Amino acid sequence: MHDVITYNDYLTGNVELSDKPISTFYSYKFKGLSPKDGSPIFYGAEDANKAALMAKYASMTPDEVYMQVMEESGQREPYIQGSVNNYLGYGNFGLSFNFTYSLGNKIRLLKICSGYASSVIYPQQNLRKEFIYRWRKPGDEAYTNIPGLVASNTLNTPWWQEYPATAYTFAGSIYDMYDNSNIRVVSGNYLKLQSLAFRYNVEEKLVRKMGLQSLYVSLVCNNLFTICSSKLKGQDPTQNGSSPQINLSIRPTFTFNINFVI
C-alpha cells in the first residue's frame, strides 16, 4: 500500500482501490481542442472555469480531485494470457508454430506530444506520423483530435501548478494530460503468430553421396502477424505508451539455417 498517493499512481495503475481490480488505471477526460490555438482541453481543468474549479477543489482531498478530472480506463494486466503450439510432420517435412494471445487489458497509445510539442519544435526532434493530421487552423477541431504545434510557453505552466492549486496538483502539462487521456487508451487484446518454423530433412541417399551423416534445412519466422485493435495503427500491443521516445513496432524476422553432421 502507498503512504502518499499521487496522480501518477492513478495514471499508471499503481493505486489500490476498494472494489477495483489490481492494476486499474485512470485517464484524463478529453473534451476537445481549442478553436483558438489547437491545444487540448479536458473536463475539470478548463481555463475558462479556472476560478470556479480552484474554489471547488480547495475543499476536496487530492483523491477526490483526481476523480473529478479522471475516469477509469481498465486494467493494465490481462485477464488471461497463453499460447497454442504444435508440430506437424509428413515424410521429410516438418512444420511447427506457436500462437500467443492476451485478453482483457487496456493499453495507452505511444506518446505523441510529451517532450516534443510542449514548446517549440526543433529540427533535430522526431515526431510521430500522427502530427500530419494535427490542428492547423480554427475549424480543424471539428475534424481532428490531434493538437496543433503551439509555440506559447504559457501552456507549460497551467493553473493547477500555481499556488494555491499546488495543494492538489492533478497533472503535468496539457500535453502530458493528452498522452494520458481517454482517447489514447485502446484494447490490448491480441492474437499473435509468435513463431513459424519449416524444416526439410534431405533424403538419406543424397546425404550419403555428399559424405554426410545427416542434413536438413529450416526456415524460422518470428512475429509474422498480430491480430489486434486497428486503433493501434502499427503499435505492437505488447508495447506501452509510457516512453517519450519514437518507437518502432516489433518487426518480423526470418532465419534460414543449414544443419549437417559430418
Image (spheres, rainbow, N blue to C red):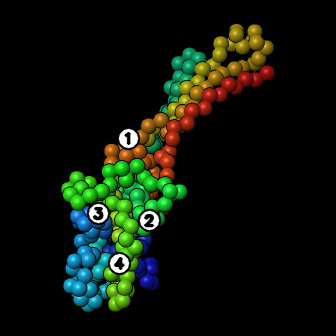
Callout in the foreground (1, 3): 3
- Element class at badge 1: strand
Nearer the N terminus, badge 2 or badge 1?
A: 2
Front: mark 1 or 4: 4
* Residues at marks 2 and 4, CA–CA distance in whole angstroms: 17 Å
Residue type, label 2? Val
Reading the image, the residue beneath label 3 is: 38
Residue 21 appears in the rendering: no
User: Residue 120: which numbered mark, if any?
Assistant: 2
Calculate the distance from the C-alpha at mark 2 to the C-alpha at mark 3: 15 Å
- Mark 4 lies on residue: 158
- Of labels 2 and 3, earlier in sequence is 3
Q: Residues within 10 Å of mark 2 (few under 14, many from 20)?
A: few
Q: CA distance from mark 3 to mark 4?
A: 16 Å
Assess disc 3: are there few (<14), some (14-19) or many (≥20) residues with their C-alpha within 10 Å of its C-alpha. many
| Image quarter hosting the N terminus | bottom left
Pinpoint residue 214: horizontal percent, then vertical percent.
Answer: 72, 20
Disc 1/disc 3 C-alpha distance (Å) = 34 Å
Query: Which residue lies at the image location 42% right of the left edge and 40% below the top edge?
Result: 226
Q: Is residue 106 left or right of residue 83?
A: left
Q: At label 3, which amino acid type do we have?
A: Gly
Mark 1 touching mark 3, by CB under 8 A? no
* 110 relative to 152, above or below: above
Identify the amino acid type marked 1. Ile
Q: Tag 4's secondary structure?
A: loop
Between discs 2 and 4, the one toward the N terminus: 2
Q: Which mark is residue 227?
A: 1
